[in-house]
Image (cartoon, rainbow, N blue to C red):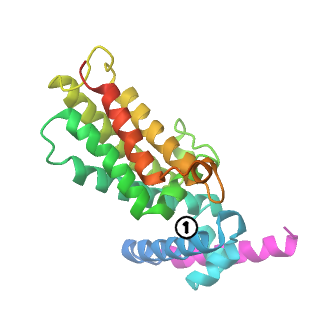
Amino acid sequence: MLIKDRMSIYVELKKGLTRVRSRNPDEKLERREAILDAAEEAFIQQRFDKTSMNSIAQSAGFSRGLLYVYFHDKEDIHIGLCARAGDLLHQRMAQYTEKCATGFIAMAALGEAYLDFYYHERDYFRILTLASGLANIKHNAEKEITPSQQAFIAAEKRIMTLMASCVQRGIDDHSVDTNVITDPMKTAMYMRGSLHGLIMLQDAGGSSLFDIEGIDRQAWLAQCKTLISRAMAPK
């Protein structure tokens, strides 16, 4: 970046900080959400790697300098979108598991919720998937964590806590194989990792083994979810 450009951003940043300090929390949140809305549209239409801070600023109707007041960089904006996606996934899981009679049924419902999230919120699913390739979030240094990272970590904790609680229900009511399932959080991580990986395997565009072999992706995912559930059922 040229020195001139850096100075321009610095001047805009100082102006932006002055304006932000004068705004109430609702106005700040509204601007932050407007930036995320613009970034979401840009990432979906242009892909993350082809989207610039300039294009996000133009879409949001703000200066580029103002974006840096609310977000550290483009990756930080993406993490903010990941927090949105995580909240949506948690809401869906909570709805699917709310009235389940046993822990095992609740665990199976988690899989249904995850597939439903993929089918109906595919862009958010892909936004979450990309998060693993971005800069590592330092969990042991709270003062270095940005608001976007804090929101994403909180969303992830809610998801995994809900999943682990369903596993714990299964252990408590003996609706799962307690000889194998002893650690709720590790089991929850296995469930999520397995299903997420399977979804990604069949999500690739273009010709693939699924097309070559004539495998119906949706039926295959449903079968895989069933196999994961059976592996945890009492023998």
Left or right of 105 in this view: 22: right
**Quadrant of residue 104 in the image?**
top left
Residue 196 drawn at (x, y percent): 48, 44
Q: Residue at x 17, y 24 (%)?
A: 172
Question: In the image, which residues are magenta?
Answer: 1-21
Q: Relative to the observer, which residue lies in front, 216 or 2?
A: 216
Q: Relative to the observer, which residue lies in front, 25 or 103?
A: 103
Residue 105 drawn at (x, y percent): 21, 38
Q: Residue at x 18, y 26 (%)?
A: 175
**Quadrant of residue 192 in the image?**
top left
| Residue 31 visible within the image | yes
Mark 1: amino acid:
Tyr
Query: Which residue is disc 1 drawn over?
Result: 70
Residue 19: say if magenta: yes
For the N terminus, the image quarter is bottom right
Q: Residue at x 64, y 51 (%)?
A: 208
| Residue, far top | 179
Q: Relative to the observer, which residue lies in front, 121 or 235?
A: 235
